[in-house]
Amino acid sequence: MWSWLAVALSGLLYIFADEKGDKVRMVLFSLLTHALLATMILAIDHLQSYQMWMLLGLGVFAVSDAIAQWQQHTKLSFVGFILAQLVYSWAMWGVVDSQFVLWLPALLLCIAIVTFLLLLPRLDSFLMPVAFMGLSLVHVLCAAGEAWLVAGTSSST
C-alpha cells in the first residue's frame, strides 16, 4: 500500500510542477513515478511476459515524457507516446486468452466519438493527432478492460 501512495504522491508533485511551469521538476517527478512503478513490477519474484512488456512501456513513456519538455521534439515525443500505448496494449492483450466481448469496445468507441465531436470546434490543426491519439487510447482501454474481465476478481464479475 505504501508503494501506491508513493506513486500517487510523486504523480501529484508532477502535476504541481506542471502548474508552476517548472520543467526540471516535471521531468524529475515523471521519471521518479515511472521508476517507482518499474520497481513495483521488478519486486515480483517471477516476471511474466506481460510484465516485461509493461516495463518496456514504462521506459518508452518515461523517455517520451522527458523529450516532450523540449519544443523542437514534439513529433518525436508524440510517436513515443503512441509506441508506449501500443506496448501497453500488447502487454494487456497477452493476458487475454478467452473469447473477445464486443460490448466493451463498442461502448468505448461510442464514448470516444461523442467526446471527439464535442471537442471538434476547438481542435483546429490538431485534428489528426488528436484522432490518432484517441483511437490509440481506446485500443489501450479495450485491452485493459478485456484483461480486467479475464482476471476474474470480485470487482470484475
Image (tube, rainbow, N blue to C red):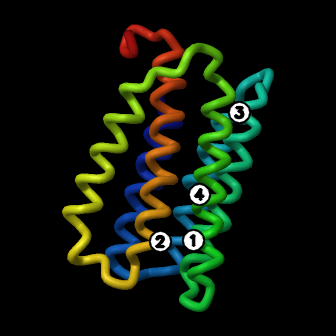
Q: Secondary structure at mark 2?
A: helix
- Disc 3 crowd rating (10 Å Cα; few below 14, some 14-19, many 20+) is many
Q: Nearer the viewer, residue 96 or 81?
A: 96
Contact between labelled residues 2 and 3, with CB atoms less than 8 Å apart: no
Q: Which residue is mark 2?
A: 129
Q: Alpha carbon of mark 3 to alpha carbon of mark 2: how far?
A: 29 Å
Residue at image location 56% in from the left, 76% down from the top: 68
Q: Secondary structure at mark 1?
A: helix
Q: Nearer the viewer, mark 3 or mark 1?
A: 1
Q: Amino acid at mark 2?
A: Pro
Q: Alpha carbon of mark 3 to alpha carbon of mark 1: how far?
A: 24 Å
Q: Secondary structure at mark 3?
A: helix
Q: Which residue is mark 3?
A: 51
Q: Amino acid at mark 1?
A: Phe
Q: Nearer the viewer, mark 4 or mark 3?
A: 3
Q: Secondary structure at mark 4?
A: helix
Residue 100 lies, in percent from the top left, at 53, 21
Residue at image location 64% in from the left, 66% down from the top: 80
Q: Is residue 116 above or below residue 144?
A: below
Residue at image location 58% in from the left, 52% down from the top: 85
Q: Which residue is mark 4?
A: 32
Q: Amino acid at mark 3?
A: Gln
Give the number of marks.
Answer: 4
Q: Nearer the viewer, residue 88 or 51?
A: 88
Contact between labelled residues 3 and 4, with CB atoms less than 8 Å apart: no
Q: Amino acid at mark 4?
A: Leu
Q: Which residue is mark 1?
A: 78
Circle nearer the N terminus (1, 4): 4
Q: Is residue 41 above or below residue 126?
A: above
